[in-house]
Image (spheres, coloured by chain):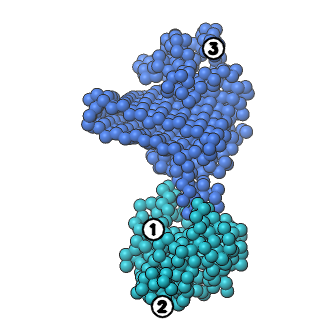
Chain colours: A blue, B cyan
Amino acid sequence: MIEQQYIDLFRQYREIIDKHSSEVLNALRDQAMNDFRCSGFPTQQVEEYKYTDIGKQFEPDFGLNLNRLPIPVNPYEVFHCDVPNLSTHLYFVENDSFYDKALPKAGIPEGVLVGSLKTFSQTHPELVSNYYGKLADTSKDGTVAFNTAFVQDGFFMYIPKNVVWEYPVQLVNILRADVDFMVNRRILIVLEDNAQLKLLICDHAMDNRNFLSTQVVEIFAGENVVFDLYELEANHDKTTRINSVYVSQQTGSNVLINGITLNNGVTRNNYHVGLYGRNAETHLYGMAIADEEQKIDNFSFIDHAVPDCTSNELYKYVLDDQATGAFCGKILVRKGSQKTRAYQSNKNICMTREAKMFTKPQLEIYADDVKCSHGATVGQLNDDALFYLRSRGIPENEARMLLMFAFVSDVIDHVRLEVLEERLHRLVEKRFRGEIGKCEGCASC
Amino acid sequence: MKLLEIKNLHASINGKEILKGIDLTVNAGEIHAIMGPNGSGKSTLSAVLTGNPAFEVTEGEIRFNGKNLFDLSPEERSCEGLFLSFQYPVEIPGVSMVNFMRTALNEHRKYKGLESISASDFLRIMREKRELVEIDAKLAGRSVNEGFSGGEKKRNEIFQMAMLEPLLSILDETDSGLDIDALRIVAGGVNKLKTEENATIVITHYQRLLDYIIPDFVHVLYNGRIVKSAGKELALELEEKGYDWLKTN
């Protein structure tokens, strides 16, 4: 059993893990490890994990940096972002440690806390412990339990009441190592009433090693909060990412999450969104481009717990070669959640006979006055459209690219950040042309 | 100068023979009309000319501008100067007209060994050609044919023809679905694009379009063969007598 070696590792290194973290984070470890011991990694017998073998991802021998040895590299110098001119507020998490040297200072709104989760949970323990681990239930998912048991640091943002952070904030998760490596990272975002924030998180593997990252993101959106989260994955094929995002939304809040997988080996994203206050709105978008043996698996659960909320979900996949895609979208409309509007759509293109897509749109409705829709399609490029383009002089390859690009463009159109939207158009085009290098955007390799 | 020379063309779809020996020669500067009842093979002829992979050529040859047409892919045929105005233009959501036309124009230029066109030149040409068929500026930002009315789609075809300046244009039922005003605009566009160097084949059911685009020759296609060719007066005769008149002859 692959779990045992991690249970032993935890026991053996418990003191070191604790020593290099904070009390708030340490407080949840025992429970998390107990839950992990009980559940283990989710197997493919679990319906929700049917298409991704999680245990297998943990089998290789990975190094961990439990002693928090510093990485002797300044990311501000070596990393050049794919989305330039986005923001002066650029932060890095190197592997699973927040990089706290040379931080941007100017233009940060008053009262905002932004930086290392470990540090802020030491300086503001009451604040952080009010939120940390409150959404990510370790008893429900073995990967979340695993992350909670091992995590030592990550990224923390606190935006106080009525504060609008005008400029987008960018967080880059960098993976660097000389050996095959595992990172366990945590992100906690607290937005008090009427706060506004746009956050772009980019994942980037800089060394040609096998990487496994687990990440748990908890987002608390107070009343009338407006929050955008963009996740951009541009890794190499040897990277596995297991990511769980939990969102809790209060009255009138508006949250948009757009997860874009440009390139990655194995991706599993879990999105759990709870609509707990009336007139809350959530927009969940995703795009996955995969080829060769890549596997992209998105799971989402939207809980319409109260009346008058809206959720909008759109996921699009383009799968080439022997790539595998999976999508499972669950929407729960609880009893009494009248006037719910919930829309879900998943559309996919398989470019080859070998590419596989598994999709499962699901609606569970226990209220009787709602507007809901769900649907999924799997198909090929339209031959008539292809011929039409060719008949105007556009070569077949180019015509295919135009159509693939057109197919995913409505996911990009939902980006509420102009610079990112423009840049994404170019990045996606490059990806389809096969021009995304293994290490696009980095100077060191 | 001979632009197009079709000799004994046979073509089929799914094993069913549609064209059963077509001979047709089109010279630069000429306008040919091909008329005929439903199912006679008119659209198959245009599909074979543009290289639609759904159709199989079983016999015969076609030379276009001195080249064997069957050696050329659909995109190469376009770059060589062949253009089809589709009977049913395809809607392509997500591909903007601007992007589509810029890509097409630059592919044509690349084929001719020319540099890509500058953004300002491109926009100027777009504007000029748009005015030719009275197409709204907003069209440029929209997806190809998406949500266009029947008339807009046909005008958009002629607009593309204006952009690509083909040697031989085939207008496949370009009049279908057009009201009189739209018909005038479309025909006006075609006439303005006419030169001594290029040629046009108009495929139509009805004589109506030929009031606006005056053909030099009218051919009647019936059951996969051209059964009669004459001057423009033939169109009027057909209008009067119907196609049955030819079947008995």
Question: Residue A94 in the image: x percent, y percent?
Answer: 62, 29
Label of residue A1 in the image: 3
Q: Secondary structure at mark 1?
A: helix
Precedes in sequence: disc 2 or disc 1: 1
Report the residue at 51% width, 69% height from top.
B86
Quarter of the rendering occupied by the N terminus of chain B: bottom right
Report the residue at 31% width, 40% height from top.
A371
Q: For the residue marked with disc 1, what is the amino acid?
A: Lys
Distance between the alpha carbons at the discs numbered 2 and 3: 88 Å
Q: Label 1: which residue? A: B153
Residue furthest to the front: B248
Classify residue A278 as left or right of residue B115: left
Pointer 1 chain: B
Question: Residue A394 in the image: x percent, y percent?
Answer: 62, 63
Q: Quadrant of residue B117?
A: bottom right
Question: Residue B136 in the image: x percent, y percent?
Answer: 42, 70
Q: For the residue marked with disc 2, what is the amino acid?
A: Glu
Q: Secondary structure at mark 2?
A: helix
Report the residue at 65% width, 70% height from top.
B77
Label 2 vs label 3, nearer the camera: 2
Q: Visible in this render: residue B61?
A: yes
Q: For the residue carrying disc 1, how many other residues have a C-alpha within 10 Å: few (<14), some (14-19), or many (20+)?
A: many
Residue A31 vertical position relative to residue A440 in the rendered view, above or below: above
Pointer 2 chain: B
Pointer 3 chain: A
Distance between the alpha carbons at the discs numbered 2 and 1: 30 Å
Q: Visible in this render: residue A95?
A: no
Label 2 vs label 1, nearer the camera: 2
Q: Secondary structure at mark 3?
A: loop
Numbered circles on residues, count: 3
Label of residue B233 in the image: 2
